[in-house]
Amino acid sequence: QVQLVESGGAMVQPGGSLRLSCAASGSISSINDMGWYRQAPGKERELVARMSSGGSTVYADSVKGRFTISRDNAKKTAYLQMNSLKPEDTAVYYCNAEIRVTFRFDRYWGQGTQVIVSS
């Protein structure tokens, strides 16, 4: 069974920083892309950032220049460094990864970690 466990969510003041982590565990053969999504109250879940196994990245326009995604393939862990946080960044942040257990890749989600940006 595959699990994605996020950590690092917290309440922070505008302009502050947070670092989220997402650790994958279980009977994993390989991982393709790993990414972060977020969902604010009353809004749809949206892509924040995604990184392929080769290191290519995609960012939402709203976070470019402020957020940085990275991953440690040996540790099966992805990170999201969030700087210059704004109140509109408040959301539950979810980790998502495309993981192969046996013969095919499937997408998995973490349980989410809350980020609140408020003064």
Image (cartoon, rainbow, N blue to C red):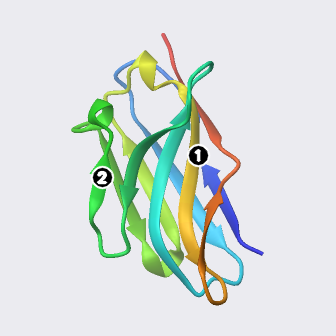
Looking at the rendered structure, the secondary structure element under dot 2 is strand
Amino acid at pointer 2: Val
- Of tags 1 and 2, which is closer to the observer? 2
Q: Tag 2 or tag 1, which sits nearer the N-term?
A: 2
In the drawing, does residue 84 fall left or right of residue 88? left
Q: Are marks 1 and 2 in contact (CB under 8 Å)?
A: no
Q: Is residue 73 left or right of residue 107?
A: left
Which x, y percent locates residue 56? 27, 65
Q: Would you identify the image quadrant in which residue 53 lies?
A: bottom left
The residue at which mark 1 appears reads as: 94
- Tell whether 31 sits left or right of 113: left
Task: Please rate how many residues cluster around mark 2, counting C-alpha atoms within 10 Å: few if below 14, some from 14 to 19, many from 20.
Answer: some
Query: Which x, y percent locates residue 67?
Result: 32, 41
Few, some or many C-alpha atoms within 10 Å of disc 1 (few <14, some 14-19, many ≥20)?
many
Residue at image x 62%, y 20%? 41
**Which structural element holds mark 1?**
strand
Q: Can you identify the residue that label 2 sits on?
A: 58
**Which of the 4 image quarters holds residue 64?**
top left
- Percent coordinates x, y for residue 2 in the rendering: 71, 72
Residue 16 in the image, given as x and y percentages of width and height: 38, 27
Q: Is 59 located above or below residue 42 in the figure?
A: below
Callout 1 amino acid: Tyr
Residue furthest out toward the right: 1
Q: Is residue 98 above or below residue 60?
A: below
| Number of the label disc, if any, that sits on residue 29 | none
Asked if 5 appears above or below 62 in the picture, the reply is: below
Q: Residue furthest left?
A: 65
> Looking at the image, can residue 74 be seen?
yes
Residue shown at 66%/83% (left/top)? 101
Q: Residue at x 43, y 19 (%)?
A: 88
